[in-house]
Amino acid sequence: MCMADLPLVYARASDPEVVRFTGEILSCEQTRELLQRRVREQASKAPFGGRAIVLKSHQLNIGYCGLDFLAHSVERRIELFYGLTRQFWGHGFATEAAAAMLKHGFRDLELNEIVAPIHPDNIRSVRVAERIGLRYRTKMDWPKQGQVNLYGLSQAEYDQSDHPTRNEIRAINSRPKLC
């Protein structure tokens, strides 16, 4: 992610349907501040934090995916998160990026478990989680959203399953992209 991605990040942050389950609509200035903060934090959060999902054929930032400590929880669990610009929904991009990040978490970072809090009405996100092997674990309270479903997968469960990916996109690796 870099500041050159601002127009595409703003397209996501200002789309009511995209942020329906994850946050609030941001103005252009709020989006700029958020992106500046994320770019600054990238290096210090490595190997955690968000990465851009880039459409290879056009080198276009179409979304984000990453791993980070689960917010709003007293337990030190690792959360998988992802999101796409609406026009790229339904093409398998989120599934591919999330699968790549899951593999990175278990293979490279040797995590024991990865979880994803998902609003029960966010059917698209539930489908992504289920396609990559995450299963419903429990409910938890989430600020601004009320109760969400917590999906998860242990490394042992991951090792026993198959997680195919496509090659049309790449999730930026754990090193931040420099602009």
Image (cartoon, helix red, strand yellow):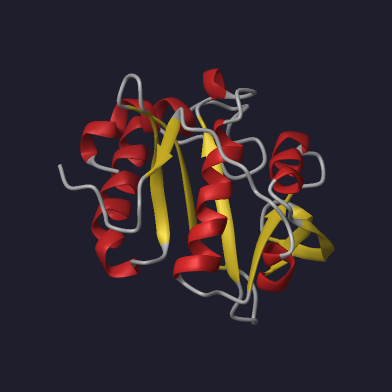
For image coordinates 51% across by 54% down, the residue present is: 101
Above or below, 82 against 107 in this view is above
Above or below, 46 against 87 in this view is below
Above or below, 156 against 3 in this view is below
Is residue 144 something one can see in this rendering?
yes
Position of residue 93 measured from the top left corner of the image (x, y, whole percent): 55, 32
Q: In this view, does 36 lie to the left or right of 9?
A: left
Q: In this view, does 152 lie to the left or right of 139?
A: left
Quadrant showing the C terminus: top left
Position of residue 87 measured from the top left corner of the image (x, y, whole percent): 53, 18
Pick the front one: 132 or 160: 160
Q: How many marks?
A: 0
For image coordinates 71% across by 72% down, the residue present is: 156
Pick the front one: 8 or 178: 178
Q: In this view, does 26 lie to the left or right of 5?
A: right
Position of residue 154 measured from the top left corner of the image (x, y, whole percent): 70, 70
Is residue 68 something one can see in this rendering?
no
Residue 125 is drawn in which quadrant? top right
Quadrant showing the N terminus: top left
Position of residue 89 measured from the top left corner of the image (x, y, whole percent): 60, 24
For image coordinates 57% across by 37% down, the residue present is: 94
Residue 76 is drawn in which quadrant? bottom right
Q: Is residue 124 left or right of residue 36?
A: right
Pick the front one: 166 or 37: 166
For image coordinates 23% across by 47% down, the residue present is: 177
